Amino acid sequence: MLGGTFDPVHLGHLRSAVEIREALGLDRVHMIPAAQPPLRGEPHITPEQRLALLRLGIGDTPGLIADARELERQGPSYSADTLVALRRECGPEARLVMALGHDAFLRLADWHAPERLFSLAHLVVVDRPDHDAALPAALAALIDGREASSVEALMREPAGGLLRLRLPSRMAISATEVRQRLVAGDSVRYLLPEAVEERIHAAGLYRR
């Protein structure tokens, strides 16, 4: 599971999903747009538009799935609820992983039912080039004793572990910067998949 607002999806999101799948040996990666992200502001376009752009961005990439389940659920998009549904589908013995960036990881203790996440899945924290901060005390307590030393060690159990993962590409692309460039009329070429860029311009998205 790789969740986010994907506002809009960019090449950093997509390349990270590919590299996470390869590094962990996953069957597939569900990329799940949040309808109502609890700890972030309102996204700039509708959930349906963000999902459509995500589908365009993924295209026919093997192993990546644009998963609409949080758009089909009422209320805030809590990751614990999403993991419950995925665990139900995959079964109790499947290795289930939730990947998140380091910036989101630093706020994990503020999430809805953070302890429950570990009962449902492993957490994999993807390092970002521009994030290197000490852990808040509540977060350090939450993850105490959970860190795995390797992918192999993590995958010995279906859930409950934490792994820090540095991806080869580490693409420092920001959706905020992409939106700012779109508003200013600046080029976003090579920041977005071509099909996503074309749809944004054709539909007049992110002009304000």
Image (spheres, grey):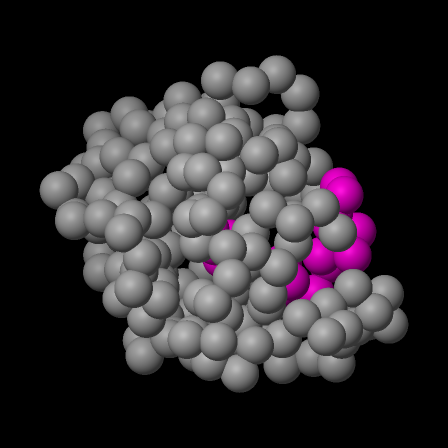
Q: In this view, does 138 lie above or below 108?
A: below
Residue 6 position by quadrant:
top left
Q: Is residue 68 above or below residue 117?
A: above
- Seen as rendered, the residue at the extreme right is 137
Give the magenta range: 96-114
Q: Nearer the viewer, residue 169 or 151?
A: 151
Q: Is residue 26 left or right of residue 88?
A: left
- Residue 19: x, y in percent? 30, 66
- Residue 185: x, y in percent? 34, 47
Q: Is residue 79 left or right of residue 5?
A: right
Residue 2 appearing in the image: no
Residue located at (55% from left, 39% from top): 83
- Residue 183: x, y in percent? 43, 43
Residue 55 appearing in the image: yes
Q: Is residue 29 above or below residue 108?
A: above
Q: In this view, does 42 lie to the left or right of 47?
A: right
Residue 108 position by quadrant:
bottom right
